[in-house]
Amino acid sequence: MNVQELLWKYAEGRCCPKERVEVEQLTSQNAGLQQDLAIIRKVQATLTTMELEQPSMRFVQQVMEHLPKRHFAAEPLIKPFWKKTFWIALAASMVAVFFSTATGNAVADPVGQYAGAVLAAVNVALEAVPPMVLQYFVLVILTFVILAVLDKTLSLRKHMNFF
């Protein structure tokens, strides 16, 4: 505890006997501390004689009315680059699903043959990936979709005044 705190505690009468002796020794040796103690006692005497003011019933409301209005700049949760990346990946996935479910009835279908080769390569690659990794990938995609929806919802509310 510093000396000023000890002086305040002494002036308030909250010191233990050991602290009281210490303060009395310090003030007897130092005239500056005697002046500080005298000032502290004057301040305490002034504070005890003052009447407490009762704030008005509308005090908080009046203060809040005079505060400047705060406008929050809504910033997108997801950067535009990642939104574009997501939509491109989604479109590519939809195309892959379409080609994977398409039947091979056409006789001369170079696009279908190419898609079949791509799907065969994708199947080989997916068989090499553990199922847990695929589950995490799906979880990341779903999280991204949820964040995109949340971002859209919050951007529609950016003009609302919250305070």
Image (spheres, rainbow, N blue to C red):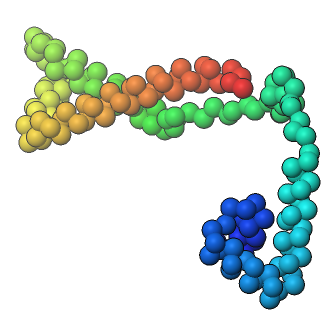
Residue 8 falls left or right of residue 113 = right
The correct choice, above or below, for 140 with respect to 23 in the image is above
Please determine whether, in this image, residue 17 is positioned above or below residue 12.
Answer: below
In terms of depth relative to the viewer, which is nearer, 144 or 7? 7
Q: Position of residue 45 (x, y in %)?
A: 89, 56
Judging depth in this view, the residue of 27 and 118 nearest the camera is 27
Q: So how many labels did they put on this image?
A: 0
Is residue 52 shown to the viewer in this render?
yes
Q: Quadrant of residue 113?
A: top left
Q: What percent of the width, then of the height, locates residue 14? A: 68, 61
Q: Is residue 124 left or right of residue 22?
A: left
Q: Nearer the viewer, residue 58 or 105?
A: 58
- Specify whether 87 is left or right of 158: left
In which image quadrant can residue 138 be found? top left
Residue closest to the far front: 17
Relative image position of residue 137 (x, y in whole percent): 25, 36
| Residue at the (75%, 79%) spot, across then down | 24
Give the image location of residue 126, x and y in percent. Answer: 12, 36
Quadrant showing the C terminus:
top right
Residue drawn at the location 89% of the way across and 68% of the way down? 39
Q: Is residue 19 left or right of residue 91?
A: right
For image coordinates 46% across by 32% down, the residue present is: 83
Please give the name of the residue rendered at 71% of the width and 23% of the height, measured from the top-left corner: 161
Q: The N terminus appears in which quarter of the rendering?
A: bottom right
Q: Using the rendered image of the protein, determine whether residue 159 is visible from the camera's viewpoint.
A: no
